[in-house]
Amino acid sequence: MKGKQHNPNGETRDAVHLMTSRGATQSMAAAALGIEEKCLRRHYRDELDGGVVQADRPWLAICSASPPAKTQALSLPRSSG
């Protein structure tokens, strides 16, 4: 693959973003495009970074979710003693 010029376009940028947002590794994305990882990182840095953030977003939402509004304190009977 060395010496072959790679020209990113909207379709390949969308593909890289989609792959990384679904959890694909850089190695997997590079192989899908038929380029080396170094070339992938050079041409698709924004898509790689954005895809990783988007892939982590569901976990962020779960971790930062507040408890339901209608929670009630647990009332335990007091022991008479």
Image (cartoon, rainbow, N blue to C red):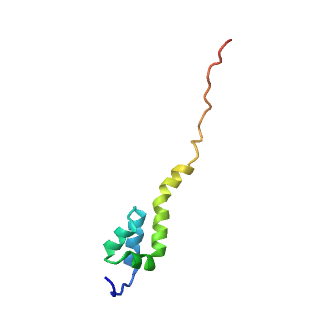
Whole-percent x, y for residue 17 in the image: 42, 70
Quarter holding residue 40: bottom left
Q: Residue at x 34, y 88 (%)?
A: 3
Q: Position of residue 49 (x, y in %)?
A: 49, 69
Please state if 79 lies on the left or on the right of 16 as rendered.
right
| Position of the N terminus by quadrant | bottom left
Q: Where does residue 63 sit, x and y in percent of width and height?
A: 54, 50
Up-down relation of residue 26 to residue 72 (above or below): below
Q: Residue lying farthest front?
A: 2
Residue at image position (32%, 72%) is 31
| Above or below, comparing residue 59 to residue 80 in the picture | below
**Circle count:** 0
Q: Is residue 35 left or right of residue 63?
A: left
Instruction: Judge left or right: residue 60 versus residue 29.
Output: right
Outermost residue toward the right? 81
Quarter location, residue 12: bottom left
Residue 13 in percent (x, y) is at 41, 76
Q: Which quarter of the image is occupied by the C terminus? A: top right
Q: Quadrant of residue 75?
A: top right
Residue at horizontal 42 percent and vertical 64 percent from the top: 21
Residue displayed at 34% across by 68% down: 28
